Image: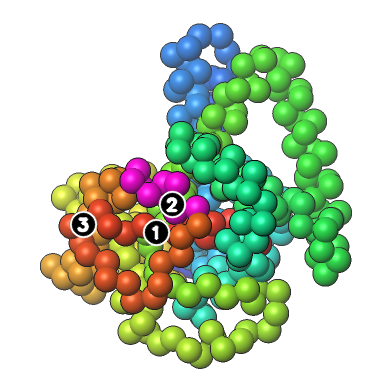
Amino acid sequence: MPGTSRYQKVFWPNLLAIVYVITAYTGGMLLILVHGVPWNAVGVLLLAHAMVIAAYLVHECIHNNIFRHSRYHYWLGEFLQWICGASYTHYDFIRHKHVRHHTDRADVVLFDYRSRITRYPVLLKIIQILEWFYIPALEVVMHALVIVLPFVRLEYRNRRSRVLVVVCMRALIFIYLASISISFVVLYPLAYMIFLTVMRFMDVHQHTYDLYETLGQERGIEAKKFDREFEHKNTYSNILSLKHPWLNLLVLNFPYHNAHHKQPGRPWYHLPRLHHELYADDDNQVLSFACLLQSYHRYRVQRVLNSDPINSPVKHHEADFIGVDGVSFLVTV
């Protein structure tokens, strides 16, 4: 209902986005279950894109940018998490982590995988080989840790029941759909890999923040260490196209990242205008899409263990920004 919307005259953009997610997800599922490579290809792309938009709508829910009441954001967020494969953890955990990212102006995690993965050289080598082939292996591992961690860390044992229920339900659904068409076993994971690749591409170059292993603790020194000037200088807008802004709708305007960090309470459909109002022709924090493609390709293996230092000399038209992996807002580890 329009009366439940947080902003006036914005009921329809959100409704259209939600309807698109449901339609594209359902249509994509049906198309990957039918026989015919062209239909399957369209289905994979629709399914992957539905997951992308669902994920960014979860991001809108986190910032309370859709409804007037937070309980509606909780319900919608939980629903959308099922679509984008992030249902193994509670919406409140995802929201808590991302809010800390904004308030602390840092990447706040349960643990930094970089300091631990080198202890497992075989696993690291497998991940690096897969990443060389553009398979987002590290992202898969990070999402898998959301499932595994409650069973190896006692302090997170309260998450076990949620994980078990969701794993059983998703496994049964997967088996049922695979019984309809065996191609589902390949095509759904393919759509999911595309989804993870898009999400990772949008994340890796948006910040040069410090990383703190304080997500499971009270806010530490990072809560007061950085100011808004630091936040702006270490945040980057990886806009797909300034000339054709409609292209940014493919990722729900998430590339207008400096504008989003300046006013997190502004919804996705306000961000292009807000970016223009705030920065006009100042492109110091806007990274070239072409250069980011080069950087994403060139450093795809090196990035697995990389963590850019704060205040890195990132330049607009140079593909020398390595970026950082494992910082998805959907991963609560």
Disc 3: which residue: 318
- Magenta region, main secondary structure: helix
Identify the disc placed on residue 192. none
Secondary structure type for disc 3: loop
Residue 168's x, y, as percent? 82, 39
| Mark with earlier residue (3, 2) | 2
Pick the quarter of the image with the C terminus.
bottom right
Residue 57 visible to the viewer: no
Mark 2 Cα within 10 Å, few/some/many (few <14, many 20+)? some
The reply to whether discs 3 and 2 touch (Cβ–Cβ < 8 Å) is no
The answer for how far apart the CA atoms under marks 3 and 2 are is 17 Å
Q: Nearer the viewer, residue 147 or 298?
A: 298
Q: Quadrant of residue 228?
A: bottom left
What are the residue bounds of the magenta stretch?
296-304
Disc 1 marks which residue? 323
Residue 285 x/y as whole percent = 25, 68
Left or right: 235 as drawn, with respect to 20? left
